Amino acid sequence: MNLKPKKSLSAKKVFEDLEYKEKWIATMKEKVWENDEWKKGQSERSKKSQNRPEVIEKHKNNTKELWKDPEFRKKAMENRPSKKVPYLLIDKENKIVREYESRDELSTKEKISLHIIRALVKENIFINCDEYSNKKKEKLSKLNGLKIIKKEDYETK
């Protein structure tokens, strides 16, 4: 027996009849999405699928191609969160030392990488240059004893 026509009719019915569609979605949600074992298995299957060398290579190549497109590049650079979120340098008394319109501006003016800034903000600690390697120590020396914080976080405290 050929199941395809039967499945097609069933699928068609789902999208034509709103009441049936709602019941069908509720049933599927109950059977599938609320089933922890199924979700765990689906997660494992997805990870296994996405971590295959050929898939990783395909994603890598697609991303490289995307970044070659000037239109995509322009849009991506304009919409980066680091372009829009203001940052502050504060001292131990919680006073503002300097203000920056974005992480990019902070990076440029203080001559430190976006990676370092991201890590410092995430750690939420005052900068102690003694804890860093000589390379980072040089870059962060003028920020010793200060903290980098998002302006919104400062205003909510």
Image (tube, rainbow, N blue to C red):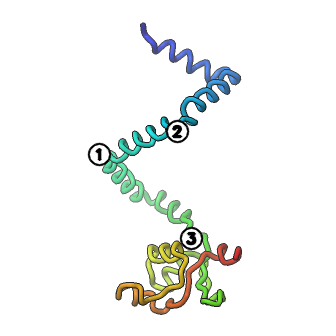
Q: Could you say whether the residue bearing mark 2 is in a helix, strand or loop? A: helix
**Quadrant in which the N terminus appears:** top left
Residue 36 image label? 2
Q: Is residue 63 above or below residue 82?
A: above
Cα distance in 3D space between marks 2 and 3: 39 Å
Q: Could you say whether the residue bearing mark 3 is in a helix, strand or loop? A: helix
Apparent side of residue 153 relative to residue 112 in the rendered image (left or right): right
Image location of residue 157, percent across then percent down: 70, 76
Q: Residues within 10 Å of mark 2 (few under 14, many from 20)?
A: few
Q: Is residue 102 above or below residue 42?
A: below
Q: Residue at x 56, y 83 (%)?
A: 147
Cα distance in 3D space between marks 1 and 3: 34 Å
Which residue in the structure is indicated by mark 3?
A: 83
Residue type, label 2:
Asp
Apparent side of residue 61 relative to residue 5 in the rendered image (left or right): left
Q: Residue furthest front?
A: 37
Q: Residue at x 50, y 39 (%)?
A: 39
Residue type, label 1:
Glu
Which residue in the structure is indicated by mark 1?
A: 54
Image location of residue 86, percent across then percent down: 62, 75
Q: Is residue 131 above or below residue 33?
A: below
Residue type, label 3:
Lys
Q: Residue furthest left?
A: 53
Image location of residue 119, percent across then percent down: 47, 74
Image location of residue 105, percent across then percent down: 54, 79
Give the foreground label among 1 and 2.
2
Asked if marks 1 and 3 touch (Cβ < 8 Å), the reply is no
